[in-house]
Image (cartoon, helix red, strand yellow):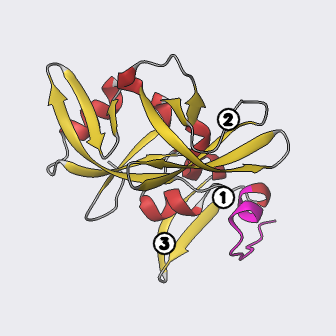
Amino acid sequence: MASIYVTHDQIEAMTLADRIVVMHGGHIQQQGTPEELFKHPANRFVAGFLGSPPMNFLDGEIVQRGEHTYIDGQGFSIELNPQRAASAKTHSAKTVTLGIRPSDLLYNPEAADSVSVDLNVVYSEYVGAQSVLLTKCGKQTVDVELKSETPIQLGETLRFAVNPAGIHLFDRQSEHAL
């Protein structure tokens, strides 16, 4: 027997549903399993709607340096893995929105420049085994989830490796995933 349950609570939907239909403005944005929608959002709305804390969005530009493809933005330059680079190269415009979930930023002071971002800690919220950091990358705000025992101080700049599988790219105009 199938049931339809309507909720505005994305956490409730993720925990209860076998399948989710995300609607916005009376239109279906995406449908699928909770995992499909979380890992492969069809657009920026779905990406920002699912997940707590929500996905970070940073404006960037697709840049080619030799054989490597990067997303450059205010305060960051991140090399794309071959799969993401291939989708970025097929995009007609060079301006994109980079999406990174707070859990895909991994504290690593030794991470290479090309796969990391340096973030200034503005605020730390202790929530038990995890802490949520509010940080700045240039003028943009970035949330980070990390283990509470990670040593941090407000005002400090920390390096975070970016999980390459956690990088999402969105067309800045249409907001569709690349």
Q: Tag 2: residue type? A: Ile
- Residue 20 picture location, percent across and down: 63, 62
Q: Is residue 16 visible?
A: yes
Residue 149 is drawn in which quadrant?
top right
Q: In the image, which residues are magenta?
A: 1-14
* Residue annotated with mark 1: 19
Mark 3 surroundings: few (<14), some (14-19) or many (≥20) residues within 10 A: few
> Which secondary structure, mark 1?
loop
- What's the distance in space between the residues labelled 1 and 3, CA to CA? 13 Å
- Residue 141 picture location, percent across and down: 48, 55
Q: Is residue 8 magenta?
A: yes
Mark linked to residue 28 = 3
Q: Quadrant of the N terminus?
A: bottom right
Q: Tag 3: residue type? A: Ile
123 horizontally vs 174: left or right = right
- Residue 89 picture location, percent across and down: 19, 37
